[in-house]
Amino acid sequence: MFRRTVTIALVLLATGGSPLMAQSEPAGATVEVNGMQMYYEVSGEGDPLIVLHGAYMNIDTMGEIIPMLAESRKIYAIEFQGHGRTTDIDRPITYPNLADDIAAFMDEVGLEKADVFGYSMGAAAGLQFAIRHPKRIGKLAAASVSYDARGWQPAFLEFIPMMTPEFFVDTPMEDEYRKLAPNPDGFPALVEKLIALEHEPMAWEDDVKKLETPVLVIAGDADVTTLEHTVALFRLLGGGGMGDMGEPLPESRLAILPASSHTAVIDQAEILRSFVIDFLEGKVPAGFM
């Protein structure tokens, strides 16, 4: 029963939890990035915004958020190492590696600087990108992100040691993988790397404190990270103080989605779009003070 429940949750994560919305004819291409053929799609017009998907996902399974963001920004949606149509290489999947892949991708497509929106694994990769390549990022919108492994919910921490490749093989997730993967038989290898990623050390507090990049932290109230950890991240970024005291609000922001599990966050595209675009454009609700 436990395996079935978690498998269903992971499948919802990989499908966005709802029927996919067709994008408005995005232009797809591949570029060589650190030895892999990285697939990406460009859509919309405006200032550049790089969109980063979660683990076991791809551009399509991000659902409606990409075409919605493309209504006002030029979107560069990428597929990470071994995900979607991007090839795998003989290298572990780590957050620093993913962050460096983003920078290398920008070099290949001629982007000097861009804003970033990431979800789950993509949000953590975006946070590492801001840490490792601060001059290449404008603002970061990070949905369902952690900066320390101790911030995961106890139930998830208990589950990590139970993860094995066999748990994921022969599931609908593998079927989805085979539809796009350059190597349809590469799913077990990808699973092993993503399980190893869950065991990678994550303790970025000192680096987060030094960030000058404005960050919008988004989380569900029943997310994979604890609410206490999410608030702690916001405070590290300079948030959490009282407004209406004559001082400008910090550039970083916090948004908590009610009645929202981890897999439900990305499925609330209209709300996410409003939060993200207002943040990127610097819009602040007016108070009567």
Image: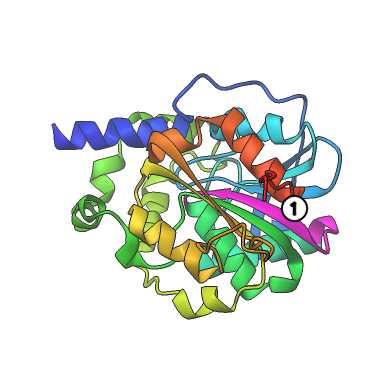
Q: Horizontally, is 88 left or right of 246 in the view?
A: left
Q: Which residues are magenta?
A: 108-120
Q: Note whether residue 33 is visible.
A: no
- Whether residue 38 appears in magenta in the rendering, the answer is no
Q: Residue at the location (35% across, 53% down)? A: 227
**Numbered disc total:** 1
Image quarter in which the N terminus is found: top left
Question: Which image quarter: residue 77?
Answer: top right
Quarter-of-image position of residue 170: top left
Residue at the image point whose x is 65% and y is 43% from the top: 276
Q: Looking at this view, name the residue that lies furthest to the left.
A: 1
Provide residue 35's location: percent of width, then percent of height. Answer: 65, 63
Residue 109 is a magenta residue: yes
The residue that disc 1 covers is 31
Tell me if residue 139 comes above or below residue 87 in the rendering: below
Residue 206's place in the image compared with 269, above or below, is below
Residue 10, percent from left and from top:
35, 37
Q: Which residue is pictured at 18% across the width and 55% down the height?
A: 158
Which residue is nearer to you in this view: 245 or 75? Answer: 245
Q: Is residue 242 visible?
A: yes
Residue at x 34% of width, y 65% of height? 149
Residue closest to the eye, 154 or 12: 154
Q: Amino acid at mark 1?
A: Val
**Percent x, y of residue 17:** 44, 26
Query: Residue 259, how many percent across, how many down?
Result: 37, 32
Mark 1, secondary structure of its residue:
strand
